[in-house]
Image: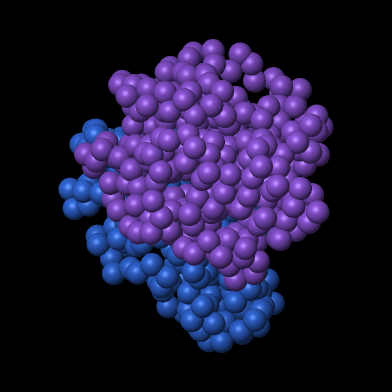
Chain colours: A blue, B purple
């Protein structure tokens, strides 16, 4: 992974791996925790829980609709039910079940979609979860999490399990740059300022936080001090942090490994338009699918890069 | 607090007719709803709730050991509400609030607003998965409750039902009983014309389920099948209950095109239907 390398960010674990490790640890703390897998537990890493707690782990096969329903049935009977597959299959194949049995029923189900965005690379667009944030943000009452690195994925996994009610968390396939020290002080719903700056704000989520930090580094060479916000909670969005960014820096660029229609950019723009209008730019997939290739090549070709973020910031600064 | 009536056919038939009449009265008052799907299931619902099948206490909807009943065919909500009210969950007068703004008696069951409802349904094909999750929860928790899922036959078109059927067989959930209200009709016509289901019993058997086929309007057959289904060990059980859509109301029964699906009876039709049910 090239992202973050130029500014010396070391590569850490994949967020899916950090999630899997933490979930397995939490099994002891939460006897009511159960996991329903769609036969991808060795990709989502829920198998690490399953190996430790086989009596609380159910692999119901490649059948996401049923998988979500079973998780909801367990939750309706008092369990904290985690269910996981690739983000694309979980949120697209399982959407009506998520709508009815998790959202409308407001059950204590934790949906975890791995292989989010386009950074999975070679396996190509059919495997890429690029609609998941839009779909999950559309579900009333759903908390939507998108950790940037392994340390934050660990903390947010713990908070997700402790949270009562439906949560969606997206995790990624590749090992990703380290943003945070171990056990960072994060809180669901509170965006983190990972770089101070007063000239423009780069509002990023997931892997794009590292790209935004790299973009900020490049902008600084031209005397532009960019603030970088890690919006690990896409919903509920941290309105105060967005409004402060708009008022204090006067311009915002969002960045996400997701479609522009309905993702982080849409959430941020709605807050900005209503509460603190300012110039905005958007980095994400612009009404297109990606293609197969090495992750760095795919990210670069489809404009999910530090260069694209910096260019958008310069456009906003006009 | 209402009471169950045991298995005396006369007493059960009295309850069944009350549930049927409520299903008609409330949908006619609402001006919308699905009375005919309630009528086909009226023996099944009466047997489950009033015939000593479900271990259930309407005064304690959160009792952890209660048997679960999931109405997968959520459009049958009026007869579920009627059964709950007749059991004393809430006053029967409230049944007339069906489908009105502010009432928890929504068009399809909403468990968040009505604590006696186990699961929010209405998107067909989802109930068996929910029931399987409940059955697995019973196993994990070491509780002896059983889970009963009432599905329509049209909703067996949904692939999710068969995903759930395979998973239940894998986990050998003998605490799970599916009941298929095989009334042979769905929205646009005969189920077997819309999407052929037969040989339905063979399908369930092939999916690993102990399978019972009965006349869903015969008390003796219903109790024999439900008792046997509950007693099955090592695999889930399904009762395919052949029923008549609009049972007991000749105007609906006689309609081969199922044009009464999702259509309430007009006031005068409803009065005739109620007289017919009560006088049968």
Residue B189 placement, left or right of A261: right
Please name whichever residue, A43 or A39, is drawn nearer the observer in this view of the structure.
A39
For the N terminus of chain A, give its image quadrant: top left
Residue B189 placement, left or right of A37: right
Residue A144 seen from this side = no
Please name whichever residue, A210 or A155, is drawn nearer the observer in this view of the structure.
A155
Say if A70 sits above or below A138 in the image: above
Please name whichever residue, A149 or B134, is drawn nearer the observer in this view of the structure.
B134
For the C terminus of chain A, give its image quadrant: bottom right
Please name whichever residue, B110 or A314, is drawn nearer the observer in this view of the structure.
B110
Residue placed at 61% from the left, 84% from the top?
A275
Q: Position of residue A17 (x, y in %)?
A: 33, 43
Say if A44 sits above or below B198 in the image: below
Residue placed at 65% from the left, 61% from the top?
B99
User: In the image as oriented, which residue stretches furthest toward the left?
Assistant: A28
Total marks shown come to 0
Residue B157 placement, left or right of A11: right
Q: Position of residue B63 (x, y in %)?
A: 30, 53
Residue placed at 76% from the left, 22% from the top?
B193
Residue B144 seen from this side = yes
Q: Position of residue A16 (x, y in %)?
A: 37, 45
Residue placed at 39% from the left, 51% from the top?
B3
Say if A183 sits above or below B262 in the image: below
Q: Position of residue A185 (x, y in %)?
A: 28, 69
């Amino acid at each position: 992974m090239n992202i973050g390398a130029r500014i010396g960010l070391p590569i850490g674990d994949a967020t899916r791996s950090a999630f899997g490790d933490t979930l397995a640890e939490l099994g002891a703390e939460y006897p009511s925790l159960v996991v329903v897998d769609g036969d991808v537990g060795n990709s989502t890493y829920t198998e690490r829980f399953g190996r430790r707690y086989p009596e609380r782990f159910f692999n119901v096969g490649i059948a996401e609709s049923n998988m979500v329903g079973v998780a909801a049935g367990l939750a309706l009977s008092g369990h904290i039910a985690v269910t996981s597959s690739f983000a694309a299959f979980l949120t697209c194949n399982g959407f009506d079940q998520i709508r009815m049995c998790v959202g409308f029923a407001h059950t204590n189900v934790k949906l975890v979609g791995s292989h989010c965005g386009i950074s999975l690379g070679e396996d190509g667009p059919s495997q890429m979860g690029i609609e998941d944030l839009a779909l999950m943000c559309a579900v009333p009452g759903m908390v939507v999490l998108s950790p940037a690195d392994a340390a934050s994925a660990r903390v947010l996994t713990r908070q997700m399990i402790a949270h009562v009610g439906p949560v969606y968390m997206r995790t990624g396939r590749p090992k990703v740059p380290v943003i945070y020290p171990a056990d960072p002080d994060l809180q669901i719903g509170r965006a983190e300022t990972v770089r101070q700056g007063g000239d423009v704000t780069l509002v990023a989520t997931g892997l794009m936080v590292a790209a935004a930090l790299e973009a900020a580094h490049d902008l600084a060479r031209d005397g532009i001090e960019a603030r970088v916000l890690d919006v690990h909670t896409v919903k509920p969005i941290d309105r105060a942090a967005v409004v402060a960014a708009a008022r204090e820096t006067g311009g915002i660029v969002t960045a996400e490994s997701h479609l522009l229609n309905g993702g982080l950019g849409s959430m941020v723009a709605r807050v900005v338009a209503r509460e603190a209008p300012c110039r905005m730019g958007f980095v994400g997939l612009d009404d297109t699918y990606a293609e197969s290739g090495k992750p760095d090549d795919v990210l670069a070709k489809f404009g999910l890069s530090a260069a694209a973020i910096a260019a958008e910031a310069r456009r906003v600064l006009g | 607090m209402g009471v169950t009536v045991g298995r005396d056919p006369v007493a059960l038939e009295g309850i069944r007719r009350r549930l049927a009449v409520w299903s008609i009265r409330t949908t006619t008052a609402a001006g919308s709803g699905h009375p005919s799907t309630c009528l086909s299931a009226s023996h099944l619902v009466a047997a489950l709730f009033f015939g000593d099948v479900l271990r259930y206490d309407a005064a304690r909807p959160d009792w952890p050991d209660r048997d679960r009943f999931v109405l997968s065919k959520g459009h049958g909500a009026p007869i579920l509400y009627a059964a709950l009210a007749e059991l004393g969950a809430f006053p029967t007068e409230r049944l007339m609030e069906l489908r009105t703004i502010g009432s928890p008696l929504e068009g399809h069951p909403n468990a968040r607003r009505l604590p006696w409802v186990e699961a929010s349904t209405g998107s067909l094909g989802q109930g068996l998965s929910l029931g399987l999750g409940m059955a697995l929860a019973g196993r994990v928790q070491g509780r002896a409750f059983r889970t009963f899922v009432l599905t329509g036959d049209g909703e067996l078109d949904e692939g999710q039902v068969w995903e759930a059927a395979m998973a239940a067989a894998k986990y050998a959930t003998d605490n799970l009983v599916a009941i298929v209200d095989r009334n042979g009709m769905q929205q646009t016509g005969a189920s077997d014309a819309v999407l052929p289901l037969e040989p339905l019993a063979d399908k369930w058997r092939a999916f690993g389920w102990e399978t019972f086929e009965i006349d869903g309007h015969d008390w003796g057959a219903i109790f024999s099948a439900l008792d046997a289904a509950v007693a099955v060990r090592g695999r889930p059980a399904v009762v395919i209950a052949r029923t008549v859509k609009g049972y007991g109301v000749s105007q609906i029964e006689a309609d081969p095109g199922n044009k009464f699906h999702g259509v309430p009876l007009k006031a005068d039709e409803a009065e005739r239907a109620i007289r017919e049910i009560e006088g049968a």
